Image (spheres, rainbow, N blue to C red):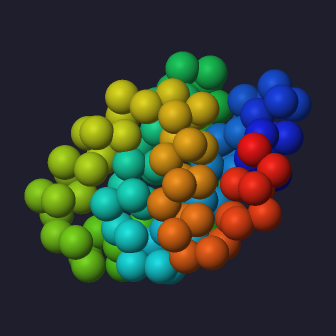
Amino acid sequence: MADEVLAVGDPDLAVDFVESFAAVAAALGQGALCASLVAACDMAREQIGLPRTTPNQQHLARFTGPANVSIGGSAWDQAYADGAGWNIEQAVAEGRVALATHGLLARSLKEA
């Protein structure tokens, strides 16, 4: 699915997809990955002029808030800074590998 989303070439769709990865990472207790993915999305949104809507921000905050608390502010800030250097393709790759360890993307990895 990740390859298909990137292949469409729609930056908005790709950012939304990575934000979904971030929410799943947070739910799985991978707070640092969540922070990095959110940062990559924030940078992409800034580059393409696509602000996050209030409903999307509220939805994402349901996951990022607890993830931030769980790893601590300084760890969050470091992971966020790391992710700010990723482009969307890198964010998809990082999310894919990390989430595959939970068996969530096994089919996608086999097809890649």
Q: Is residue 91 above or below residue 102?
A: above
- Left/right placement of residue 110 relative to residue 18 reads right
Residue 58: x percent and y percent?
Answer: 56, 66
| Residue 46, placed above or below residue 61 | above
Q: Residue at x 24, y 58 (%)?
A: 76
* Image coordinates for residue 108, horizontal then vertical, percent: 76, 56
For residue 60, say whether it is visible: no
Name which residue lies at 27% across and 50% down.
79
Left/right placement of residue 70 relative to residue 58 reads: left
Q: Quadrant of residue 20?
A: bottom right
Q: Is residue 78 left or right of residue 32?
A: left
The picture quadrant where one finds residue 49 is top right
Q: Is residue 66 left or right of residue 56?
A: left
Residue placed most toward the observer, 1 or 38: 1
Residue 84 visible from this viewpoint: yes
Q: Residue furthest top?
A: 47
The single residue placed furthest to the left in the displayed view is 74
Residue 10 x, y percent position in the rendering = 81, 29
Q: Nearer the viewer, residue 112 or 40?
A: 112
Query: Which residue occupies 59% across, 54% down?
Result: 96
Q: Seen from this angle, which residue lies furthest front?
A: 110
The residue closer to the viewer here, 52 or 30, is 30
Q: Position of residue 33 (x, y in %)?
A: 39, 58
x 62%, y 21%: residue: 48
